[in-house]
Amino acid sequence: MPRPNEKIFSCPARQKIMEFFSNSPASIDTLRGIMAWTGLTKKEAIKALEELVKEGILTPHRTSSTVGYAYTPDKNMSKKIIKYFNKSGR
Amino acid sequence: MKDGYTQDFLRRIAENLNLKRQQQVFEGMLGRATWEVLPIKTAKDKNPDRFSNDGGCGFSVPLKQGNQFYGYVTARGFKYPVTDELMSVFTVFIETVMREVQKDMELTKLYDTIRPRAIALSTIHTVLRRISSTLDLEELMPRIARLCLQVMRAEMCNIFLLDKNKKRLILKTSVSSDKEIKKSGFQMKPAGSLGRVAKTGASVFTPKRLLVPLIDEDVIGIISIRNKLGDKPFTEFDKEILTTFAEQAVIAIRNAQLYEEQEKLTIGSIKALAAILDTRPQRIQTHSAMFVKLVVDVAKQMEMSMQEIRVLKYASLLHDAGKMMIPDEILKKPRKLTGEEFQIVKRHPLKGVEIVKPIEVLKPVIPVILYHHERFDGTGYPKGLKGKEIPLGSRIMAVVDAFISMISKQAYRESLSLDEAVAEIKKYSGTQFDPDVVDVFSRIILKANLTMLLKMK
Protein backbone atom coordinates (compact mmCIF):
# COMPACT_ATOMS: atom_id res chain seq x y z
CA MET A 1 0.00 0.00 0.00
CA PRO A 2 1.47 3.42 -0.91
CA ARG A 3 2.25 5.79 1.94
CA PRO A 4 3.13 9.45 1.73
CA ASN A 5 6.84 10.00 1.93
CA GLU A 6 7.21 12.73 4.57
CA LYS A 7 10.04 14.32 2.58
CA ILE A 8 7.48 15.13 -0.08
CA PHE A 9 6.10 17.86 2.18
CA SER A 10 9.45 19.52 2.71
CA CYS A 11 9.18 21.74 -0.37
CA PRO A 12 7.04 24.91 0.05
CA ALA A 13 5.39 24.52 -3.37
CA ARG A 14 4.27 20.96 -2.58
CA GLN A 15 3.11 22.12 0.84
CA LYS A 16 0.99 24.88 -0.69
CA ILE A 17 -0.64 22.44 -3.10
CA MET A 18 -1.26 19.90 -0.35
CA GLU A 19 -2.77 22.58 1.87
CA PHE A 20 -5.06 23.61 -0.96
CA PHE A 21 -6.25 20.03 -1.48
CA SER A 22 -6.55 19.42 2.25
CA ASN A 23 -8.83 22.44 2.55
CA SER A 24 -10.77 21.51 -0.60
CA PRO A 25 -10.50 17.71 -0.81
CA ALA A 26 -13.32 17.47 -3.37
CA SER A 27 -11.56 19.76 -5.80
CA ILE A 28 -10.41 18.71 -9.26
CA ASP A 29 -8.48 21.48 -10.90
CA THR A 30 -6.19 22.26 -13.77
CA LEU A 31 -2.67 23.62 -13.58
CA ARG A 32 -4.05 27.11 -14.19
CA GLY A 33 -6.59 26.75 -11.39
CA ILE A 34 -4.03 25.41 -8.93
CA MET A 35 -1.68 28.26 -9.76
CA ALA A 36 -4.53 30.71 -8.98
CA TRP A 37 -5.43 29.08 -5.64
CA THR A 38 -1.86 28.65 -4.42
CA GLY A 39 -0.10 31.66 -5.93
CA LEU A 40 2.64 29.42 -7.34
CA THR A 41 4.37 30.13 -10.63
CA LYS A 42 3.79 27.79 -13.56
CA LYS A 43 7.23 26.25 -13.23
CA GLU A 44 6.87 25.66 -9.47
CA ALA A 45 3.36 24.26 -9.85
CA ILE A 46 4.24 21.86 -12.69
CA LYS A 47 7.22 20.45 -10.78
CA ALA A 48 5.31 20.08 -7.51
CA LEU A 49 2.27 18.52 -9.20
CA GLU A 50 4.42 15.99 -11.04
CA GLU A 51 6.11 14.99 -7.79
CA LEU A 52 2.82 14.66 -5.92
CA VAL A 53 1.39 12.53 -8.74
CA LYS A 54 4.51 10.33 -8.70
CA GLU A 55 4.11 9.91 -4.95
CA GLY A 56 0.50 8.76 -5.40
CA ILE A 57 -0.92 11.67 -3.41
CA LEU A 58 -2.61 13.33 -6.38
CA THR A 59 -4.40 11.66 -9.27
CA PRO A 60 -4.23 13.16 -12.76
CA HIS A 61 -7.52 13.03 -14.70
CA ARG A 62 -6.33 13.45 -18.26
CA THR A 63 -8.21 14.62 -21.35
CA SER A 64 -6.81 15.42 -24.75
CA SER A 65 -6.77 19.13 -23.92
CA THR A 66 -5.92 19.31 -20.22
CA VAL A 67 -5.21 17.50 -16.96
CA GLY A 68 -7.38 17.83 -13.87
CA TYR A 69 -5.49 17.14 -10.64
CA ALA A 70 -7.27 15.80 -7.57
CA TYR A 71 -6.59 14.08 -4.29
CA THR A 72 -6.09 10.36 -4.71
CA PRO A 73 -9.32 8.39 -4.32
CA ASP A 74 -7.36 5.70 -2.47
CA LYS A 75 -8.94 5.82 0.97
CA ASN A 76 -5.93 4.37 2.78
CA MET A 77 -3.68 7.00 1.28
CA SER A 78 -6.27 9.68 2.17
CA LYS A 79 -6.30 8.52 5.79
CA LYS A 80 -2.51 8.71 5.91
CA ILE A 81 -2.49 12.21 4.45
CA ILE A 82 -5.12 13.40 6.96
CA LYS A 83 -3.14 11.78 9.76
CA TYR A 84 0.01 13.50 8.58
CA PHE A 85 -1.67 16.90 8.48
CA ASN A 86 -3.20 16.43 11.93
CA LYS A 87 0.14 15.32 13.33
CA SER A 88 2.08 18.19 11.82
CA GLY A 89 -0.65 20.68 12.84
CA ARG A 90 -0.76 22.18 9.37
CA MET B 1 -20.08 40.47 24.89
CA LYS B 2 -17.00 38.54 23.74
CA ASP B 3 -18.14 36.50 20.75
CA GLY B 4 -15.77 35.52 17.95
CA TYR B 5 -16.54 38.58 15.87
CA THR B 6 -15.95 40.94 18.81
CA GLN B 7 -12.69 39.26 19.73
CA ASP B 8 -11.54 39.42 16.14
CA PHE B 9 -12.62 43.05 15.86
CA LEU B 10 -10.75 44.10 19.03
CA ARG B 11 -7.69 42.11 18.00
CA ARG B 12 -7.61 43.86 14.63
CA ILE B 13 -8.11 47.30 16.24
CA ALA B 14 -5.16 46.59 18.53
CA GLU B 15 -3.10 45.42 15.55
CA ASN B 16 -3.98 48.54 13.57
CA LEU B 17 -3.01 50.74 16.50
CA ASN B 18 0.16 48.72 16.65
CA LEU B 19 -0.64 47.71 20.24
CA LYS B 20 -0.06 44.46 21.97
CA ARG B 21 -2.23 44.08 25.03
CA GLN B 22 -0.89 47.21 26.66
CA GLN B 23 1.80 49.42 25.31
CA GLN B 24 3.58 52.57 26.30
CA VAL B 25 3.19 55.07 23.50
CA PHE B 26 4.02 58.56 24.65
CA GLU B 27 6.69 59.95 26.84
CA GLY B 28 7.93 63.42 27.66
CA MET B 29 5.50 66.28 27.79
CA LEU B 30 2.43 64.09 27.47
CA GLY B 31 3.68 61.76 30.18
CA ARG B 32 4.27 58.04 30.17
CA ALA B 33 0.92 57.18 28.63
CA THR B 34 -0.11 53.59 28.11
CA TRP B 35 -2.78 52.50 25.64
CA GLU B 36 -5.06 49.53 25.85
CA VAL B 37 -7.91 48.07 23.87
CA LEU B 38 -10.47 46.81 26.35
CA PRO B 39 -13.52 44.68 25.72
CA ILE B 40 -16.72 45.96 27.34
CA LYS B 41 -17.29 44.42 30.75
CA THR B 42 -19.95 46.63 32.31
CA ALA B 43 -22.51 49.03 30.95
CA LYS B 44 -20.67 52.30 30.74
CA ASP B 45 -21.12 55.61 29.07
CA LYS B 46 -20.63 55.01 25.37
CA ASN B 47 -19.30 58.50 24.78
CA PRO B 48 -15.68 59.60 24.78
CA ASP B 49 -14.56 60.20 28.30
CA ARG B 50 -11.71 62.14 29.89
CA PHE B 51 -10.54 61.33 33.34
CA SER B 52 -7.80 61.98 35.85
CA ASN B 53 -6.73 59.84 38.78
CA ASP B 54 -3.62 59.01 40.74
CA GLY B 55 -1.98 57.47 37.70
CA GLY B 56 -2.34 60.75 35.72
CA CYS B 57 -4.83 61.93 33.16
CA GLY B 58 -6.31 59.88 30.34
CA PHE B 59 -9.29 59.22 28.11
CA SER B 60 -11.46 56.43 26.79
CA VAL B 61 -12.91 56.26 23.29
CA PRO B 62 -15.77 53.78 22.80
CA LEU B 63 -15.52 51.30 19.94
CA LYS B 64 -18.99 51.56 18.37
CA GLN B 65 -20.43 50.51 15.04
CA GLY B 66 -24.01 51.70 14.69
CA ASN B 67 -25.80 50.33 17.74
CA GLN B 68 -23.11 47.74 18.38
CA PHE B 69 -20.74 48.52 21.21
CA TYR B 70 -17.58 46.41 21.47
CA GLY B 71 -15.27 48.03 24.01
CA TYR B 72 -12.90 50.91 24.53
CA VAL B 73 -9.56 52.23 23.55
CA THR B 74 -8.12 53.68 26.72
CA ALA B 75 -5.04 55.80 27.19
CA ARG B 76 -3.86 56.67 30.66
CA GLY B 77 -0.82 58.22 32.32
CA PHE B 78 -0.82 61.64 30.63
CA LYS B 79 0.99 64.36 32.58
CA TYR B 80 -1.69 66.97 31.75
CA PRO B 81 -5.44 66.81 31.27
CA VAL B 82 -6.38 65.84 27.75
CA THR B 83 -7.50 68.90 25.81
CA ASP B 84 -10.59 69.10 23.58
CA GLU B 85 -8.40 69.35 20.51
CA LEU B 86 -6.34 66.29 21.43
CA MET B 87 -9.49 64.38 22.35
CA SER B 88 -11.07 65.30 19.03
CA VAL B 89 -7.97 64.15 17.12
CA PHE B 90 -7.89 60.82 19.01
CA THR B 91 -11.61 60.24 18.45
CA VAL B 92 -11.36 60.85 14.71
CA PHE B 93 -8.26 58.67 14.54
CA ILE B 94 -9.96 55.79 16.37
CA GLU B 95 -13.05 56.09 14.16
CA THR B 96 -10.88 55.95 11.05
CA VAL B 97 -9.10 52.85 12.34
CA MET B 98 -12.49 51.25 13.10
CA ARG B 99 -13.75 51.90 9.59
CA GLU B 100 -10.60 50.37 8.11
CA VAL B 101 -10.91 47.32 10.34
CA GLN B 102 -14.58 46.93 9.47
CA LYS B 103 -13.76 47.05 5.73
CA ASP B 104 -10.98 44.56 6.25
CA MET B 105 -13.28 42.18 8.11
CA GLU B 106 -15.95 42.44 5.43
CA LEU B 107 -13.36 41.64 2.78
CA THR B 108 -12.18 38.61 4.77
CA LYS B 109 -15.77 37.41 5.14
CA LEU B 110 -16.35 37.89 1.42
CA TYR B 111 -13.16 36.01 0.58
CA ASP B 112 -14.10 33.16 2.92
CA THR B 113 -17.54 32.96 1.28
CA ILE B 114 -16.45 33.30 -2.32
CA ARG B 115 -13.26 31.23 -2.36
CA PRO B 116 -14.88 27.81 -1.71
CA ARG B 117 -17.57 28.59 -4.28
CA ALA B 118 -14.97 29.67 -6.83
CA ILE B 119 -13.04 26.46 -6.16
CA ALA B 120 -16.26 24.42 -6.56
CA LEU B 121 -17.03 26.25 -9.81
CA SER B 122 -13.55 25.56 -11.08
CA THR B 123 -14.00 21.88 -10.18
CA ILE B 124 -17.29 21.67 -12.06
CA HIS B 125 -15.62 23.31 -15.05
CA THR B 126 -12.79 20.75 -14.99
CA VAL B 127 -15.30 17.90 -14.59
CA LEU B 128 -17.28 19.18 -17.57
CA ARG B 129 -14.20 19.33 -19.75
CA ARG B 130 -13.39 15.79 -18.73
CA ILE B 131 -16.79 14.25 -19.36
CA SER B 132 -17.48 16.11 -22.57
CA SER B 133 -14.20 15.01 -24.12
CA THR B 134 -15.54 11.57 -25.07
CA LEU B 135 -18.57 10.37 -26.98
CA ASP B 136 -17.87 6.72 -26.29
CA LEU B 137 -20.43 5.50 -23.73
CA GLU B 138 -18.20 2.64 -22.61
CA GLU B 139 -15.48 5.11 -21.77
CA LEU B 140 -17.79 7.84 -20.49
CA MET B 141 -19.60 5.86 -17.78
CA PRO B 142 -16.55 4.82 -15.70
CA ARG B 143 -15.13 8.30 -16.24
CA ILE B 144 -18.25 9.90 -14.76
CA ALA B 145 -18.20 7.42 -11.88
CA ARG B 146 -14.54 8.09 -11.09
CA LEU B 147 -15.05 11.87 -11.16
CA CYS B 148 -18.12 11.44 -9.01
CA LEU B 149 -16.11 9.53 -6.41
CA GLN B 150 -13.52 12.25 -6.53
CA VAL B 151 -15.91 15.15 -6.12
CA MET B 152 -18.10 13.45 -3.52
CA ARG B 153 -15.20 11.82 -1.63
CA ALA B 154 -17.17 8.58 -1.53
CA GLU B 155 -16.10 4.94 -1.51
CA MET B 156 -18.30 3.58 -4.27
CA CYS B 157 -20.24 4.83 -7.25
CA ASN B 158 -22.70 2.87 -9.41
CA ILE B 159 -24.37 4.29 -12.49
CA PHE B 160 -27.57 2.69 -13.76
CA LEU B 161 -29.46 3.50 -16.95
CA LEU B 162 -33.09 2.58 -17.53
CA ASP B 163 -33.83 0.46 -20.59
CA LYS B 164 -36.04 1.84 -23.35
CA ASN B 165 -39.23 0.44 -21.78
CA LYS B 166 -38.19 1.84 -18.40
CA LYS B 167 -38.80 -1.58 -16.89
CA ARG B 168 -35.26 -2.57 -16.02
CA LEU B 169 -32.23 -0.81 -14.63
CA ILE B 170 -28.96 -1.72 -16.30
CA LEU B 171 -25.78 -1.29 -14.28
CA LYS B 172 -23.46 0.60 -16.61
CA THR B 173 -20.48 0.93 -14.32
CA SER B 174 -19.41 0.31 -10.76
CA VAL B 175 -16.29 1.99 -9.47
CA SER B 176 -14.83 1.93 -5.97
CA SER B 177 -12.15 4.09 -4.40
CA ASP B 178 -10.04 1.05 -3.50
CA LYS B 179 -10.04 -0.73 -6.80
CA GLU B 180 -11.92 -0.33 -9.97
CA ILE B 181 -14.62 -2.98 -10.32
CA LYS B 182 -16.00 -1.72 -13.60
CA LYS B 183 -18.67 -4.39 -13.91
CA SER B 184 -21.52 -3.60 -16.21
CA GLY B 185 -24.47 -5.14 -17.89
CA PHE B 186 -26.16 -6.44 -14.71
CA GLN B 187 -29.90 -5.89 -15.02
CA MET B 188 -32.57 -5.61 -12.35
CA LYS B 189 -36.15 -4.54 -11.86
CA PRO B 190 -36.27 -1.11 -10.25
CA ALA B 191 -37.12 -1.93 -6.65
CA GLY B 192 -36.44 -0.47 -3.20
CA SER B 193 -34.63 2.86 -3.09
CA LEU B 194 -33.54 2.56 -6.72
CA GLY B 195 -37.13 1.89 -7.75
CA ARG B 196 -38.34 4.91 -5.80
CA VAL B 197 -35.82 7.19 -7.52
CA ALA B 198 -36.64 5.73 -10.95
CA LYS B 199 -40.36 6.16 -10.36
CA THR B 200 -40.50 9.55 -8.66
CA GLY B 201 -37.35 11.25 -9.95
CA ALA B 202 -36.63 12.34 -6.36
CA SER B 203 -33.28 11.81 -4.66
CA VAL B 204 -32.83 9.36 -1.80
CA PHE B 205 -30.50 10.49 0.91
CA THR B 206 -29.21 8.60 3.95
CA PRO B 207 -26.03 9.16 5.96
CA LYS B 208 -24.31 6.34 4.06
CA ARG B 209 -25.98 6.46 0.68
CA LEU B 210 -27.01 9.02 -1.90
CA LEU B 211 -29.14 8.24 -4.95
CA VAL B 212 -29.71 10.99 -7.49
CA PRO B 213 -31.71 10.63 -10.71
CA LEU B 214 -30.30 11.35 -14.15
CA ILE B 215 -33.09 13.37 -15.68
CA ASP B 216 -33.49 14.32 -19.33
CA GLU B 217 -37.16 15.29 -19.50
CA ASP B 218 -37.80 11.96 -17.76
CA VAL B 219 -35.62 9.76 -15.55
CA ILE B 220 -33.05 8.00 -17.75
CA GLY B 221 -30.89 6.58 -14.97
CA ILE B 222 -29.52 6.87 -11.46
CA ILE B 223 -26.17 7.75 -9.89
CA SER B 224 -25.72 5.95 -6.59
CA ILE B 225 -22.85 6.66 -4.21
CA ARG B 226 -22.01 4.97 -0.93
CA ASN B 227 -19.92 5.72 2.16
CA LYS B 228 -18.27 9.09 2.43
CA LEU B 229 -14.52 8.85 3.04
CA GLY B 230 -13.43 9.40 6.61
CA ASP B 231 -16.60 7.74 7.98
CA LYS B 232 -18.52 10.97 7.66
CA PRO B 233 -22.23 11.09 6.80
CA PHE B 234 -23.51 12.53 3.55
CA THR B 235 -25.01 15.97 4.01
CA GLU B 236 -27.65 18.09 2.32
CA PHE B 237 -24.75 19.97 0.68
CA ASP B 238 -23.46 16.66 -0.78
CA LYS B 239 -26.90 16.04 -2.24
CA GLU B 240 -26.86 19.46 -3.91
CA ILE B 241 -23.39 18.86 -5.34
CA LEU B 242 -24.32 15.39 -6.66
CA THR B 243 -27.51 16.78 -8.19
CA THR B 244 -25.49 19.46 -10.03
CA PHE B 245 -23.00 16.80 -11.06
CA ALA B 246 -25.83 14.55 -12.36
CA GLU B 247 -27.28 17.43 -14.39
CA GLN B 248 -23.95 17.82 -16.16
CA ALA B 249 -23.43 14.06 -16.51
CA VAL B 250 -26.81 13.58 -18.16
CA ILE B 251 -25.89 16.03 -20.94
CA ALA B 252 -22.72 14.08 -21.67
CA ILE B 253 -24.61 10.75 -21.53
CA ARG B 254 -27.34 11.96 -23.90
CA ASN B 255 -24.74 13.33 -26.33
CA ALA B 256 -22.91 9.99 -26.29
CA GLN B 257 -26.18 8.10 -26.76
CA LEU B 258 -27.18 10.29 -29.71
CA TYR B 259 -23.74 9.86 -31.20
CA GLU B 260 -24.01 6.10 -30.75
CA GLU B 261 -27.38 6.06 -32.52
CA GLN B 262 -25.95 8.15 -35.36
CA GLU B 263 -22.95 5.85 -35.52
CA LYS B 264 -25.22 2.79 -35.73
CA LEU B 265 -27.10 4.38 -38.64
CA THR B 266 -23.89 5.17 -40.50
CA ILE B 267 -22.36 1.76 -39.82
CA GLY B 268 -25.65 0.14 -40.88
CA SER B 269 -25.52 1.95 -44.23
CA ILE B 270 -21.87 1.06 -44.76
CA LYS B 271 -22.53 -2.57 -43.84
CA ALA B 272 -25.38 -2.62 -46.36
CA LEU B 273 -22.95 -1.36 -48.98
CA ALA B 274 -20.38 -3.97 -47.89
CA ALA B 275 -23.06 -6.67 -48.12
CA ILE B 276 -23.71 -5.67 -51.74
CA LEU B 277 -19.97 -6.00 -52.36
CA ASP B 278 -20.07 -9.48 -50.84
CA THR B 279 -22.45 -10.63 -53.56
CA ARG B 280 -19.50 -10.38 -55.94
CA PRO B 281 -17.05 -13.25 -56.12
CA GLN B 282 -14.09 -12.62 -53.80
CA ARG B 283 -10.58 -13.95 -53.83
CA ILE B 284 -10.24 -13.16 -50.13
CA GLN B 285 -12.82 -11.91 -47.67
CA THR B 286 -10.91 -9.23 -45.81
CA HIS B 287 -13.69 -6.99 -44.62
CA SER B 288 -14.87 -9.53 -42.06
CA ALA B 289 -15.74 -8.61 -38.46
CA MET B 290 -12.35 -9.99 -37.40
CA PHE B 291 -10.57 -7.76 -39.91
CA VAL B 292 -12.37 -4.69 -38.60
CA LYS B 293 -11.72 -5.69 -34.97
CA LEU B 294 -7.99 -6.23 -35.51
CA VAL B 295 -7.64 -2.93 -37.39
CA VAL B 296 -9.47 -1.04 -34.62
CA ASP B 297 -7.48 -2.80 -31.87
CA VAL B 298 -4.17 -1.83 -33.47
CA ALA B 299 -5.41 1.74 -34.02
CA LYS B 300 -6.37 2.04 -30.34
CA GLN B 301 -3.00 0.73 -29.22
CA MET B 302 -1.33 3.25 -31.49
CA GLU B 303 -3.31 5.97 -29.72
CA MET B 304 -5.25 7.17 -32.74
CA SER B 305 -8.05 9.58 -31.86
CA MET B 306 -11.67 8.44 -31.62
CA GLN B 307 -12.42 10.30 -34.83
CA GLU B 308 -9.52 8.62 -36.67
CA ILE B 309 -10.58 5.21 -35.38
CA ARG B 310 -14.14 5.84 -36.55
CA VAL B 311 -12.88 6.69 -40.04
CA LEU B 312 -10.66 3.62 -40.03
CA LYS B 313 -13.61 1.43 -39.04
CA TYR B 314 -15.60 2.65 -42.04
CA ALA B 315 -12.57 2.28 -44.31
CA SER B 316 -11.91 -1.27 -43.15
CA LEU B 317 -15.45 -2.23 -44.16
CA LEU B 318 -15.06 -0.68 -47.60
CA HIS B 319 -11.38 -0.86 -48.42
CA ASP B 320 -11.89 -3.42 -51.20
CA ALA B 321 -15.02 -1.79 -52.64
CA GLY B 322 -13.10 -1.22 -55.87
CA LYS B 323 -12.98 -4.96 -56.52
CA MET B 324 -16.56 -4.51 -57.72
CA MET B 325 -15.01 -3.23 -60.94
CA ILE B 326 -12.71 -6.22 -61.45
CA PRO B 327 -13.98 -8.83 -63.96
CA ASP B 328 -15.42 -12.04 -62.46
CA GLU B 329 -12.93 -14.30 -64.25
CA ILE B 330 -10.02 -12.59 -62.48
CA LEU B 331 -11.69 -12.69 -59.06
CA LYS B 332 -12.71 -16.33 -59.51
CA LYS B 333 -9.39 -17.48 -60.95
CA PRO B 334 -8.13 -20.45 -58.90
CA ARG B 335 -4.49 -19.92 -59.90
CA LYS B 336 -1.98 -17.13 -59.48
CA LEU B 337 -2.75 -14.04 -61.54
CA THR B 338 -0.78 -13.10 -64.64
CA GLY B 339 1.05 -9.78 -64.78
CA GLU B 340 -1.71 -8.19 -66.84
CA GLU B 341 -4.42 -9.48 -64.52
CA PHE B 342 -2.50 -8.17 -61.54
CA GLN B 343 -2.33 -4.73 -63.20
CA ILE B 344 -6.15 -4.77 -63.32
CA VAL B 345 -6.35 -5.82 -59.65
CA LYS B 346 -3.97 -2.99 -58.73
CA ARG B 347 -6.51 -0.48 -59.96
CA HIS B 348 -9.02 -1.46 -57.25
CA PRO B 349 -8.01 1.19 -54.67
CA LEU B 350 -8.71 3.94 -57.24
CA LYS B 351 -11.98 2.29 -58.20
CA GLY B 352 -12.89 2.00 -54.51
CA VAL B 353 -12.38 5.74 -54.10
CA GLU B 354 -14.73 6.36 -57.05
CA ILE B 355 -17.43 4.34 -55.29
CA VAL B 356 -17.21 6.08 -51.89
CA LYS B 357 -16.45 9.59 -53.17
CA PRO B 358 -20.07 10.73 -53.65
CA ILE B 359 -20.96 9.77 -50.05
CA GLU B 360 -20.20 12.83 -47.90
CA VAL B 361 -19.74 10.93 -44.61
CA LEU B 362 -17.15 8.67 -46.27
CA LYS B 363 -14.90 11.44 -47.60
CA PRO B 364 -12.37 11.11 -44.72
CA VAL B 365 -11.86 7.41 -45.55
CA ILE B 366 -10.66 8.12 -49.11
CA PRO B 367 -6.91 8.39 -48.36
CA VAL B 368 -7.04 5.23 -46.20
CA ILE B 369 -8.71 3.23 -48.98
CA LEU B 370 -6.54 4.72 -51.70
CA TYR B 371 -3.22 3.89 -50.04
CA HIS B 372 -3.87 0.59 -48.27
CA HIS B 373 -1.68 -1.27 -50.81
CA GLU B 374 1.26 1.09 -50.45
CA ARG B 375 4.40 -0.50 -49.00
CA PHE B 376 6.59 1.01 -46.30
CA ASP B 377 9.66 0.95 -48.58
CA GLY B 378 7.84 2.80 -51.37
CA THR B 379 7.35 -0.16 -53.72
CA GLY B 380 3.59 -0.39 -53.34
CA TYR B 381 0.74 1.00 -55.39
CA PRO B 382 -0.98 3.20 -56.62
CA LYS B 383 1.40 6.11 -55.82
CA GLY B 384 4.53 4.44 -54.46
CA LEU B 385 4.33 6.43 -51.22
CA LYS B 386 7.00 5.68 -48.64
CA GLY B 387 7.14 5.40 -44.81
CA LYS B 388 5.09 7.99 -42.94
CA GLU B 389 3.83 9.47 -46.22
CA ILE B 390 1.36 6.60 -46.14
CA PRO B 391 -1.58 7.35 -43.81
CA LEU B 392 -1.29 5.43 -40.54
CA GLY B 393 -4.71 3.84 -41.11
CA SER B 394 -3.49 2.46 -44.44
CA ARG B 395 -0.29 1.12 -42.84
CA ILE B 396 -2.39 -0.67 -40.22
CA MET B 397 -4.80 -2.07 -42.80
CA ALA B 398 -1.89 -3.33 -44.91
CA VAL B 399 -0.61 -5.48 -42.03
CA VAL B 400 -4.02 -6.84 -41.00
CA ASP B 401 -5.03 -7.41 -44.62
CA ALA B 402 -1.88 -9.47 -45.28
CA PHE B 403 -2.33 -11.43 -42.04
CA ILE B 404 -5.95 -12.34 -42.76
CA SER B 405 -5.03 -13.25 -46.31
CA MET B 406 -2.25 -15.59 -45.07
CA ILE B 407 -4.37 -17.45 -42.50
CA SER B 408 -7.27 -17.82 -44.99
CA LYS B 409 -7.39 -20.80 -47.30
CA GLN B 410 -6.90 -19.78 -50.92
CA ALA B 411 -7.87 -21.58 -54.07
CA TYR B 412 -4.24 -21.53 -55.15
CA ARG B 413 -2.52 -22.24 -51.79
CA GLU B 414 -3.05 -23.62 -48.28
CA SER B 415 -3.49 -21.28 -45.33
CA LEU B 416 -0.63 -20.58 -42.91
CA SER B 417 -0.80 -21.20 -39.16
CA LEU B 418 -1.11 -18.16 -36.87
CA ASP B 419 2.55 -18.41 -35.86
CA GLU B 420 3.69 -18.78 -39.46
CA ALA B 421 1.60 -15.78 -40.51
CA VAL B 422 2.97 -13.60 -37.69
CA ALA B 423 6.52 -14.71 -38.56
CA GLU B 424 5.90 -13.78 -42.19
CA ILE B 425 4.58 -10.35 -41.19
CA LYS B 426 7.66 -9.79 -39.01
CA LYS B 427 9.90 -10.88 -41.89
CA TYR B 428 8.61 -7.98 -43.98
CA SER B 429 8.70 -5.44 -41.17
CA GLY B 430 10.47 -2.33 -42.42
CA THR B 431 10.12 -3.27 -46.10
CA GLN B 432 6.48 -4.04 -46.83
CA PHE B 433 5.14 -3.03 -43.41
CA ASP B 434 5.62 -0.23 -40.89
CA PRO B 435 7.79 -1.73 -38.07
CA ASP B 436 5.83 0.17 -35.38
CA VAL B 437 2.56 -1.27 -36.64
CA VAL B 438 4.09 -4.76 -36.84
CA ASP B 439 5.24 -4.53 -33.19
CA VAL B 440 1.82 -3.50 -31.96
CA PHE B 441 0.05 -6.02 -34.16
CA SER B 442 2.28 -8.92 -33.00
CA ARG B 443 1.56 -8.05 -29.37
CA ILE B 444 -2.16 -7.94 -30.05
CA ILE B 445 -2.14 -11.32 -31.80
CA LEU B 446 -0.21 -12.83 -28.87
CA LYS B 447 -2.85 -11.61 -26.45
CA ALA B 448 -5.82 -12.19 -28.77
CA ASN B 449 -8.38 -14.85 -28.25
CA LEU B 450 -6.76 -17.64 -30.26
CA THR B 451 -9.93 -19.73 -30.28
CA MET B 452 -11.73 -16.90 -32.00
CA LEU B 453 -8.97 -16.47 -34.56
CA LEU B 454 -8.78 -20.19 -35.25
CA LYS B 455 -12.54 -20.40 -35.58
CA MET B 456 -12.35 -17.62 -38.12
CA LYS B 457 -9.74 -19.61 -40.02
Image (cartoon, coloured by chain):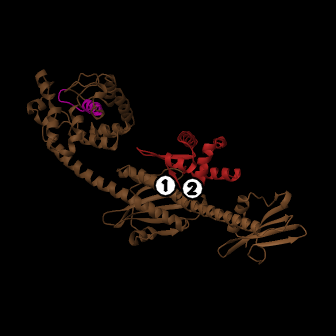
Chain colours: A red, B brown
Image location of residue B255, percent across then percent down: 33, 56
Q: Badge 2 local density, few (<14 within 10 Å), some, or many (20+)? A: some
Which mark, by number, is residue B123? 1
Q: Residue at x 34, y 51 (%)?
A: B135
Q: Is residue B399 magenta?
A: yes
Chain to which mark 2 belongs: A
Q: Residue at x 63, y 63 (%)?
A: B105
Instruction: Name the amino acid, label 2.
Output: Ser
Image location of residue B407, percent across then percent down: 27, 31
Residue highlighted by disc 2: A24
Q: Is residue B281 visible?
A: no
Quarter of the image that includes the N terminus of chain B = bottom right
Report which quarter residue B334 is drawn in. top left
Quarter of the image that includes the C terminus of chain B = top left
Instruction: Name the amino acid, label 1.
Output: Thr
Q: Is residue A23 visible?
A: yes
